[in-house]
Image (cartoon, rainbow, N blue to C red):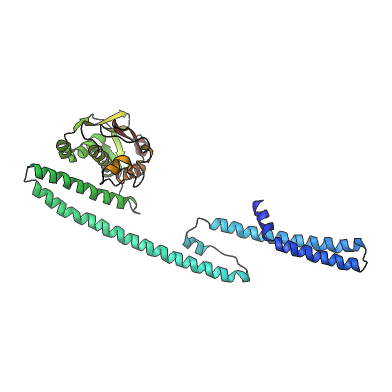
Amino acid sequence: MKLFFSYLKQRRKNFILYLLFLTIFCIILYLYHIPLFVMLYPSVLCTFIALIFMIADFISIKRKHDQFCRIKGMTASEIAAFPHEVHITENDLADIINELIAQSIRLENDKNEQYNDMIEYYTLWAHQIKTPIASMRLTLQNEDSRLSRQLKSDLFRVEQYVEMVLAFLRLNSESTDYVFAQHSLDKIIKQAVRRFAGEFIVRGISLEYEPTNMEIITDEKWLSFVIEQIISNALKYTKEGSIKIYSKKPKLLCIEDTGIGIAKEDLPRIFEKGYTGKGGRSDKSASGIGLYLCRRICSNLGAEIKAESEPDRGTVISINLGQYQLRSE
């Protein structure tokens, strides 16, 4: 109905012109003293024919409208392959549209090519930077001083940032390297904690770990990345106290800290890309990418990640692993 009223509004000049001609026709007949019924017959006949043409024109407009509605949401390449029915007077417009489509396709191809080149470059860079990092770590292993421990801690953070870059690049890659198999959750947690052993010692943070005794179906590498990111955040924002790792209920892994906590207004947005919140803004090194990657990876793994927190009372990050059982079945 909305389309019909829009059609009437668009064609109002034609209707006014038709009524004007009909009025002139009736006036001329009236001046020649033609009886009223004689004037009425051709007027009704012309109006009937005009209605037929109007209905046919409206059906044609509606058909085009439906076609354009189907085109909405298509990519440029799909629009180019879409069959277009145009009249002779619309050929120029069709040529313009086809040229715009061709330009859009070229821009899209150029953009994809540039994006792929960038991904290849940063992937190569991330892999190459691991060589000097490994060399520096080997050099520092032969020393045990306050300075060497600080350098090891800084080097470990550099390694984390490199891993974060690789995870970000792989996350949007067309090909994924997810390999699902049965794993011991405790083994994955212990491997992640072992990497942060030096950080726990340097920062004076205690670890309270309760074995979960869970066997899950997951991708070990990606779940390890998520757990490491959560532990890293817990260490970063915990000045004193402890970090607890436990299972609250079947298939629910919890990582709790006694850190600065998260403001109530920030809590719903901490998993958004680039969002740092008040705590992140106080730490200039915060990127707002870590928890975003955790949420994306958990989604790909079929898990659910949530956060509970109060300012100055600590934070609890929970990962619901219950959906892994569905995968194994």
Q: Residue at (23%, 57%) from the top-left corner?
A: 125
Q: Residue at (65%, 56%) from the top-left corner?
A: 6
The image shows residue 208 at horizontal and vertical percentages of 21, 29
Q: Count the marks: how many?
A: 0
Q: Residue at (36%, 42%) from the top-left corner?
A: 299
Does the image show residue 69? yes
Q: Nearer the viewer, residue 186 or 99?
A: 99
Q: Nearer the viewer, residue 59 or 29?
A: 29
The quadrant in which the C terminus is found is top left
**Horizontal side, residue 322 vs residue 161: left or right:** right
- Relative to 276, residue 86 above or below: below
Does the image show residue 219? no
The image shows residue 280 at horizontal and vertical percentages of 29, 42
Q: Quadrant of residue 275?
A: top left
The image shows residue 119 at horizontal and vertical percentages of 30, 58
Q: Residue at (88%, 67%) from the top-left corner?
A: 29
**Horizontal side, residue 265 vs residue 223: left or right:** right
Q: Quadrant of residue 195?
A: top left
Q: Quadrant of residue 37?
A: bottom right
**Horizontal side, residue 316 vs residue 36: left or right:** left
The image shows residue 322 at horizontal and vertical percentages of 35, 34
Q: Nearer the viewer, residue 34 or 84?
A: 34
